[in-house]
Image (cartoon, coloured by chain):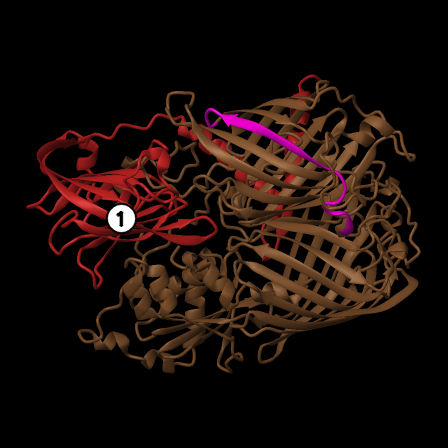
Chain colours: A red, B brown
């Protein structure tokens, strides 16, 4: 008798969950309460999953990989993922476009190693005007930069910035046990009224800094830290495999 | 064949080596650095006991951020106020309030419940030296227990802050002059005349009380709010409200002081809690909830699309552009079968597809996305990935049943060229055509197994009834089963059965109406547990250029059955739509089975709909209502591209305010919130409701399912442009 009690409780819970979630058939979509329930469960399990330690990737593991991979870290959320090259393109503008894709259908797109778009993160960088030149990895010049950002009520907003490109000289960096001789370039960008003190900044005004560690002869941006718009913030990007 | 699907190119080994780590995981993110450009809305003002920006009982001159939607619950001295406020324009806000006063013991009420509306207009924004100035009308319709008018000024100052961020605190000084309730303590006279009628708890109310605005005694009020950091706030005010009725005629509480004190704490981004010492005798509390349609709880993130594949250059690879494949009689069917599963992955169902060597017209149903533009973008991507290179022009026709809503025309070469260009969104809009959906081409191939289509669902339902004088909110809760059978795109049968599990709607008050009781018999309709909510057959189609038609027959809603017909004229590019609707209905039996009562009525309206810019949609309906009364309904809604809408309506008919009863005429507010606003996942559902201060029988329209305007507007030029940013998502 005592043993049946937990069973009854479980079946009651399952019954209640089924009742609240509802059931549908045919070409109709899932019921509203079902979606609420599913999303809540997914979000709870995702929060639990986040507490799992991120595994350490070694060079021995990377040597087994034949495809190019990058690691992307969202600084604000302190989470990272490995992305594979899912598309390579050229268009009428200078630079090679590579779109990188994560397991959870997030993409990060770069032109000559300079970030031009994200998708699947929410508040995405829809497109960007970046100063790149043919055959030159990373940003090629000082000048205007425009970020087109999805925000608010499904609108897209342009953030205009003036950037100074500064050469900080040679630096040796390490990515998963391998050392690379690079040149450290820094882009210092400011919006038209973005040079005020923090408390006097108006909405959409401010300044950002993008860093690139580049092997200019090989034409590879090995590592970078780039701003992806006000809703996503900075992304740390390292090239793990070529 | 150019069919190359890119994403899973990596080796199996890599998949095994790399742990599946997620980039889009919903974790609590930190905020932006202090120097980064931010598009977050500014910190909104705090709210008072009446749910307006303010101190405690007194208002301030601040306005909420544009579009802000707030709910405030406050209580002190046995008086509870529940207020919702909407900032409809940067300089205009409107509030609806429901309040209960305990220990009233007057006019037969132990606890007195009332509803009221407020509006506030900002006259000046705050300048460097000039304070903001706002004019407010409080409880300006109805019996007006809280009726007051005021002119108030507020000025912000920076102060030293608390905490490590070393950001400055804010000090807000407020002073104002009030009339009515806000002119009742220590008044300095009546500058605009003394002829203000006293509060009359027995009036039917409902009339706009413009004849008493700014009349009678006036008094000064004021106060200070100090926010040393983003979490804490302190308030002090001098109240000019004497609470004459509550402390003189009845004994609701004791007013011992003119000063009120409070401390508030920002518990979360959207929630603020406050505790107060009121009038020297009472403890008060508030809970303030604020949200903004433009700041979703979770930012909408659809799974990233696959990049558009570029076709080989025509000059170097002319054979790829050969159109011979299109000569085959089976080409249409073949391509439909190849495209269908790929489109289905994007939540798109094929209704019809028409292929030629150089163009494709896809008539499709958007089953997943709230936004029509993301569905169009995803459909275009699938076509660009799959179809032979010679197909250059894409005509995308979103459908609602058999109705083609509009034609979105894109060139494949534009999609290829623009995907990664700066400002691709505007660049694509500039080369995209949005036109009327034409007639179905004779060579169109229908989608597979779309019809007949049977869909069903079981789920819970909630049926609230508001503002009963005995119980503020009544609610029925139960199980509903609905089913829809679509014979063809133009014909469907739909029905819903409800079974109540528990609830108390059946205990409400009966009708005391002198009009035919077309709505006030809701208690009689709430007696049975199992009811047929609706059961009808519907026919919908496009009847001429720019003209859409609907005919519906059956048990249309819980209280009426009959026949309903509608015609709507709405050109794709026009902000104006015109419609007519005619219905002949008979009142249903209270048990809501198949029986009908004797009362029948011919009801119908001529309607004009106007998209006025800034998301405002106005509607004017002129015609005959369910009780046989003749008049007009004016409604105004602010719609947001993300699916939010907030609005209100009022109806004036030839029924006198005496015959109408309490409230004098029909009016209410309504809102609708898309589910994806909360969860950030694509869905098409929304939650919403309309709330009337009181339900009477005058000015009542039939609730017909499937009215045309909302469905049609959704995919017309203005709506598509408003949400165009999603086309590349």
- Who is closer to the viewer here, B703 or B455? B703
Q: Is disc 1 surrounded by few (<14), some (14 to 19) or many (20+) residues within 10 Å? A: many
Report which residue position mark 1 lands on.
A161
Quarter assignment of residue B417: bottom left
Q: Chain of mark 1?
A: A
Instruction: Report the residue at 43% width, 31% height from top.
Output: B28
Instruction: Check the image and report above or below for B701 versus A224.
Output: below
- Which secondary structure lies at badge 1? strand
**Is A82 displayed left or right of B486 in the figure?**
left
Q: Is residue B222 magenta?
A: yes
Query: Residue A113: x and y, percent?
Result: 20, 47
Q: Is residue A32 visible?
A: yes
Q: Is residue A5 left or right of residue A228?
A: right
Image coordinates of residue B722 in percent, x first then y, are: 47, 60
Q: Is residue B474 visible?
A: no
Viewport quadrant of the N terminus of chain B: bottom left
Q: Start and end of the magenta stretch?
A: B211-230
Location of residue B342 in the rendering, given as x and y in whole percent from the top left corner = 42, 60
Q: In front: B33, or B9?
A: B33
- Indicate the quadrant containing the C terminus of chain B: top left, top right, bottom left or bottom right: bottom left
Q: Residue at x 64, y 29 (%)?
A: B56
Residue B636 part of the magenta segment: no
Query: What is the count of numbered marks?
Result: 1
Along the line of sight, the residue nearer the viewer: B697 or B347: B697
Residue positioned 60% across, 64% down in the render: B711
Hey, which quadrant is residue B638 in on the image?
bottom right
- In the visual, does B280 lie left or right of B19? right
Question: As rendered, which of B242 and A70 lies closer to the eye?
Answer: B242
On screen, residue B427 above or below A2: below
Residue B620 vs A147, above or below: the answer is below
Q: Residue B717 at x, y = what percent?
A: 49, 68
Q: Is residue A237 above or below residue B256?
A: below
């Amino acid at each position: 008798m005592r043993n049946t009690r937990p069973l009854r409780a479980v079946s009651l819970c399952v019954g209640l969950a089924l009742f609240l979630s509802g059931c549908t058939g045919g070409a109709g979509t899932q019921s509203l309460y079902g979606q609420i329930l599913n999303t809540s469960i997914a979000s709870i399990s995702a929060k639990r999953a986040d507490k799992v330690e991120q595994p350490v990737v070694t060079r021995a593991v990377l040597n087994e990989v034949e495809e190019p991979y990058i690691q992307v870290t969202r600084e604000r959320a302190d989470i990272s993922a490995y992305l594979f090259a899912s598309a390579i393109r050229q268009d009428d503008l200078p630079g090679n476009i590579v779109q990188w894709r994560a397991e959870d259908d997030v993409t990060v797109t770069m032109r000559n190693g300079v970030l031009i778009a994200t998708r699947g993160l929410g508040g995405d960088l829809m497109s960007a005007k970046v100063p790149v030149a043919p055959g030159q990895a990373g940003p090629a010049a000082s000048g205007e930069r425009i970020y087109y950002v999805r925000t608010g009520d499904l609108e897209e907003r342009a953030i205009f910035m003036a950037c100074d490109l500064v050469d900080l000289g040679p630096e040796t960096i390490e990515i998963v046990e391998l050392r690379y001789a690079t040149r450290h370039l820094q882009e210092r960008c400011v919006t038209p009224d973005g040079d005020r003190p923090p408390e006097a900044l108006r909405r959409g005004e401010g300044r950002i800094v993008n860093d690139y560690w580049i092997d200019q002869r090989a034409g590879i941006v090995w590592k970078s830290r780039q701003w992806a718009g006000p809703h996503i913030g900075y992304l740390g990007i390292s090239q793990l495999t070529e | 064949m150019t069919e190359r699907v890119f994403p899973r190119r990596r080796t199996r080994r890599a998949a095994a080596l790399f742990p599946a780590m997620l980039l889009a995981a919903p974790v609590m993110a930190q905020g932006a650095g202090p120097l980064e450009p931010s598009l977050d809305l500014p910190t909104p003002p705090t709210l008072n006991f009446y749910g307006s920006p303010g101190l405690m009982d007194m208002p301030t001159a601040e306005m909420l951020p544009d579009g802000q939607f707030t709910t405030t619950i406050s209580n002190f001295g046995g008086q509870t106020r529940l207020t919702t406020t909407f900032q409809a324009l940067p300089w205009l806000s409107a509030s609806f309030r429901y309040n209960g006063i305990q220990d009233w013991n007057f006019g037969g009420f132990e606890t007195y419940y009332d509803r009221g509306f407020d509006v506030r207009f900002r006259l000046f924004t705050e300048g460097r030296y000039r304070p903001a100035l706002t004019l407010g009308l409080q409880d300006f319709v109805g019996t007006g227990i809280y009726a007051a008018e005021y002119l108030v000024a507020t000025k912000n100052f920076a102060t030293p802050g608390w905490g490590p961020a070393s950001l400055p605190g804010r000090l807000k000084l407020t002073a104002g002059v009030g009339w009515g309730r806000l002119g009742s303590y220590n008044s300095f006279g009546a500058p605009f005349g003394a002829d203000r009628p006293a509060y009359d708890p027995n009036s039917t109310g409902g009339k706009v009380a413009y004849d008493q605005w700014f009349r009678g005694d006036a008094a000064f009020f004021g106060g200070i709010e100090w926010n040393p950091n983003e979490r804490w706030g302190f308030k002090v005010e001098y109240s000019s409200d004497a609470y004459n009725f509550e402390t003189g005629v009845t004994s609701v509480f004791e007013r011992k002081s003119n000063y009120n004190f409070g401390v508030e704490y920002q518990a979360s981004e959207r929630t603020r809690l406050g505790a107060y010492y009121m009038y020297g005798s009472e403890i008060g509390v508030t809970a303030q909830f604020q949200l903004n349609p433009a700041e979703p709880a979770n930012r909408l993130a659809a799974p990233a699309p696959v990049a558009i594949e570029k076709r080989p250059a025509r000059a170097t690879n002319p054979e790829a552009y050969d159109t011979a494949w299109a000569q085959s009689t089976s080409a249409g069917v073949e391509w439909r079968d190849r495209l269908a599963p790929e489109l289905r992955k994007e939540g798109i169902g094929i209704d019809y597809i028409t292929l030629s060597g150089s163009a494709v017209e896809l008539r499709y149903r958007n089953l997943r996305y709230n936004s029509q533009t993301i569905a169009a973008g995803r459909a275009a991507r699938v076509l660009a990935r799959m179809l032979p290179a010679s197909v250059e022009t894409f005509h995308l026709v979103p459908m609602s049943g058999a109705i083609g809503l509009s034609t979105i025309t894109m060139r494949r070469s534009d999609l290829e060229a623009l995907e990664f260009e700066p400002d691709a969104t505007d660049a694509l809009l500039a080369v995209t055509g949005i036109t009327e959906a034409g007639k179905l081409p004779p060579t169109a191939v229908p989608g597979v197994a779309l019809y007949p289509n049977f869909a069903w669902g079981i789920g819970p339902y909630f049926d609230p009834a508001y503002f009963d004088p005995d119980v503020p909110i009544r609610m029925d809760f139960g199980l509903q089963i609905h089913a829809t059978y679509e014979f063809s795109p133009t014909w469907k049968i739909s029905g819903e059965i409800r079974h109540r599990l528990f609830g108390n709607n059946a205990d409400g008050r009966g009708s005391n109406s002198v009009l035919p009781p077309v709505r006030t018999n809701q208690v009689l309709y709430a007696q049975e547990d199992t009811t047929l909510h609706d059961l009808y057959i519907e026919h919908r189609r496009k009847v001429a250029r720019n003209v859409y038609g609907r005919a519906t027959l059956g048990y249309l809603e819980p209280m009426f059955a009959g026949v309903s017909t509608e015609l709507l004229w709405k050109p794709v590019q026009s902000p104006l739509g015109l419609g007519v609707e005619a219905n002949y209905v008979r009142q249903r039996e209270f048990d809501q089975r198949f029986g009908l009562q004797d009362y029948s009525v011919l009801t119908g309206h001529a309607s004009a709909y106007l998209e006025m810019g800034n998301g405002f949609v106005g509607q004017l309906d002129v015609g005959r209502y369910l009780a046989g009364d003749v008049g007009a309904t004016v409604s105004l809604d602010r719609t947001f591209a993300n699916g939010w809408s907030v609005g209100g309506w009022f109806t004036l008919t030839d029924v006198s305010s005496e015959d109408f009863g309490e409230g004098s005429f029909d009016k209410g507010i309504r809102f609708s919130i898309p589910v994806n606003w909360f969860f950030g996942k694509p869905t098409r559902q929304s939650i919403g409701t309309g709330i009337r201060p009181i339900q009477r029988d005058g000015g009542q329209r039939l609730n017909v399912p499937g009215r045309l305007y909302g469905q049609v507007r959704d995919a017309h030029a203005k709506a598509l442009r408003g949400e165009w940013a999603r086309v590349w998502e």
